[in-house]
Amino acid sequence: MKQQSVWLLALAAVLLVGCASQKGPAEQAVAGTETALAAVRHDAQKYVPDQLQAVDAQLAALRGSLSKGDYKAVLTGAPTVNSAIRSLKYAAEAKKADAELALAKAKDAWGPLSTEVPKTVDAIESRVAALSKEQHLPKGVSKSSLAAARSGVDSLKSMWSEASNASASGDFATAVNKAQAAKEKAAQIMRSLGMSF
């Protein structure tokens, strides 16, 4: 009986030493994953927030295993979390590259629009002013289309102001969308006034 209890004590000591020897590597594994995730967090938050949330959950589970002393689970789970962090990094980089490309295209499109649309608005405004002074409207232009064009000019100016403000704040995608909408509305007004464009 005495010999059996000695064996049990020896086995418990071996298990305790085994667990203690895994504690350091487990803590290092969690610290390593935290550092790796911190390095990509900013871009991931901006470009792939859903994927970041999933990786955060995996890391939280890893931390939970560490706090419970389940070092084996930490050591077996850490490579999976690190793989998820690498995937997160690549996904964020791809989305960031797409966003930068879209921004470059929007900036390129903004240049011509920023000169073309204001000139068109000015031309429409001049045409509306000239037609408003005339006794007889030209063929194809009605009083109602002239009135609609007059209110349309105010709407165009407002749209253009929004586009300009968006470009001033660096949001070229929004600026281009608003400028395109203004350009399309201007084309409709020009047709209603018998103007060429």
Image (tube, rainbow, N blue to C red):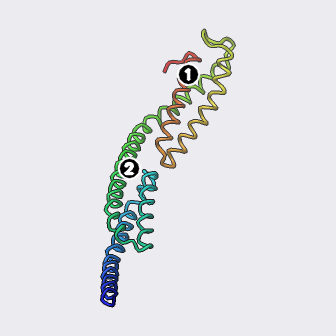
Q: Which of 77 and 100 lies nearest the eye of the viewer?
A: 77
Q: Quick one: which residue is furthest to the bottom in this view? A: 2
Which one is earlier in the sequence, the residue at label 1 or at label 2?
A: 2
Label 2 element class: helix
Whether label 1 touches label 2, CB < 8 Å: no
Q: Which mark is residue 188?
A: 1
In x, y percent, where is residue 12?
34, 82
In x, y percent, where is residue 168?
51, 47
Q: Which of 173 and 9 lies nearest the eye of the viewer?
A: 9
Q: Is residue 197 above or below residue 54?
A: above
Q: Quadrant of the N terminus?
A: bottom left
| Residue that appears at 57% across and 40% down | 162
Residue tagged by mark 2?
Answer: 96
Label 1 element class: helix
37 sits to left or right of 180: left
Using a 10 Å C-alpha cutoff, classify the residue at mark 2 as few (fewer than 14 neighbours), some (14 to 19) or many (20 or more): some
| Residue that appears at 41% across and 72% down | 66
Q: Which of 14 and 45 lies nearest the eye of the viewer?
A: 14
| Residue that appears at 35% across and 58% down | 85
So how many labels did they put on this image? Answer: 2
Q: Quick one: which residue is furthest to the front in this view? A: 1
Q: CA distance from mark 1 to mark 2?
A: 37 Å
Q: Quick one: which residue is furthest to the top in this view? A: 139
In x, y percent, where is residue 65?
42, 69
Using a 10 Å C-alpha cutoff, classify the residue at mark 1 as few (fewer than 14 neighbours), some (14 to 19) or many (20 or more): some
Residue type at tag 1: Gln
Residue type at tag 2: Lys
Q: Which mark is residue 63?
A: none
In x, y percent, where is residue 54?
44, 55
131 sits to left or right of 78: right
